[in-house]
């Protein structure tokens, strides 16, 4: 049995200091300290005080997915305690659900076992020729962005995350990306 509480604006991060969730949206929740706060959603941002950067919130590997509330306007699912923040830290901080404890998901499995560990993105077969089929992230000057953490929001609203290789390639096939509307966020 694992319990996941809703993440809300102002929730702290495991990286300490003044790290906290800085965005929320739409629905509010009555918190234990009597204040009302906005629910946080995946793709919204948190401030990490350890690396002094903003990062988007992504679902922790193995955490509940379809049990999360879905907001149609944002096209995003609710963030939960234990979700990761894609800041510049090598070890991603997690959201600590301090306030939103009146909202929870209970799971029967051991879903929390994987929480807090960075996801490994499945490798696309590593032949040079296949690289043409993948996305390359480029900066404003057209230079490829190597070894950068990124998050892809698929048309379904689901998030996938990974790190570009030394040539800026992502895990996502460009043919897939062409067939649907996606959004790419760079961490930090
Ligand atoms: Zn950080």
Image: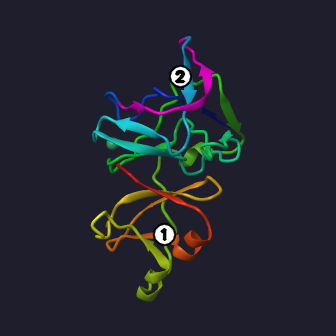
Residue 79 lies, in percent from the top left, at: 56, 39
Closer to the camera in the image, 12 or 110: 12
Magenta stretch contains residue 97: no
CB contact under 8 Å: marks 2 and 1: no
Element on which disc 1 rests: strand
Q: Residue at x 55, y 47 (%)?
A: 59
Give the camera-side residue of 147 and 123.
Answer: 147
Image coordinates of residue 124 in percent, x first then y, are 50, 76
Instruction: Give the residue displayed 62% in from the left and 58% down from the top.
Output: 155
Q: Residue furthest top?
A: 34
- The quadrant in which residue 137 appears is bottom left
The magenta segment:
19-33
Instruction: Using the image, determine if residue 146 lies above or below residue 108.
Output: below
Q: Is residue 9 above or below residue 82?
A: above
**Image quadrant where one finds the N terminus:** top right
- Horizontal side, residue 50 vs residue 61: left or right: left
Residue pictured at 48% horizontal, 61% vertical: 120
The answer to whether 52 appears left or right of 160 in the picture is left
- Dot 2 surroundings within 10 Å: few (below 14), some, or many (20 or more)? many
Local packing at callout 1 (Cα closer than 10 Å; few below 14, some 14-19, many 20+) is many
Per the rendering, the mark at residue 171 is 1
Q: Position of residue 32 (x, y in %)?
A: 57, 15
User: Is 26 covered by the magenta stretch?
Assistant: yes
> Can you identify the residue that label 2 sits on?
99
Q: In the displayed structure, does residue 76 sit left or right of residue 24?
A: right
Q: CA distance from mark 2 to mark 1?
A: 35 Å
Give the quarter the ligand 1 occupies: top left
């Amino acid at each position: 049995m694992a319990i996941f509480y809703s993440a809300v604006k102002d929730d702290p991060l495991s990286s300490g200091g003044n790290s906290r969730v800085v965005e929320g949206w739409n629905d509010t929740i009555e918190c234990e300290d009597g204040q009302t706060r906005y629910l946080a959603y995946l793709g919204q941002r948190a401030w990490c005080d350890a690396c002094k950067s903003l990062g988007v919130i992504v679902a922790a590997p193995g955490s509940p997915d379809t049990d999360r509330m879905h907001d149609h306007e944002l096209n995003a699912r609710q963030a939960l305690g234990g979700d990761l923040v894609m800041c510049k830290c090598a070890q991603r901080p997690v959201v600590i659900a301090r306030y939103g404890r009146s909202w929870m998901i209970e799971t029967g499995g051991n879903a929390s076992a994987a929480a807090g560990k960075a996801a490994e993105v499945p490798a696309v077969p590593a032949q040079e020729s296949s690289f043409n089929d993948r996305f390359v992230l480029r900066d404003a000057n057209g230079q490829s962005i190597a070894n950068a953490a990124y998050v892809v929001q698929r048309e379904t609203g689901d998030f996938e995350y990974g790190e570009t290789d030394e040539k800026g390639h992502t895990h996502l096939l460009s043919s897939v990306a062409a067939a649907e509307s996606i959004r790419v966020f760079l961490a930090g």
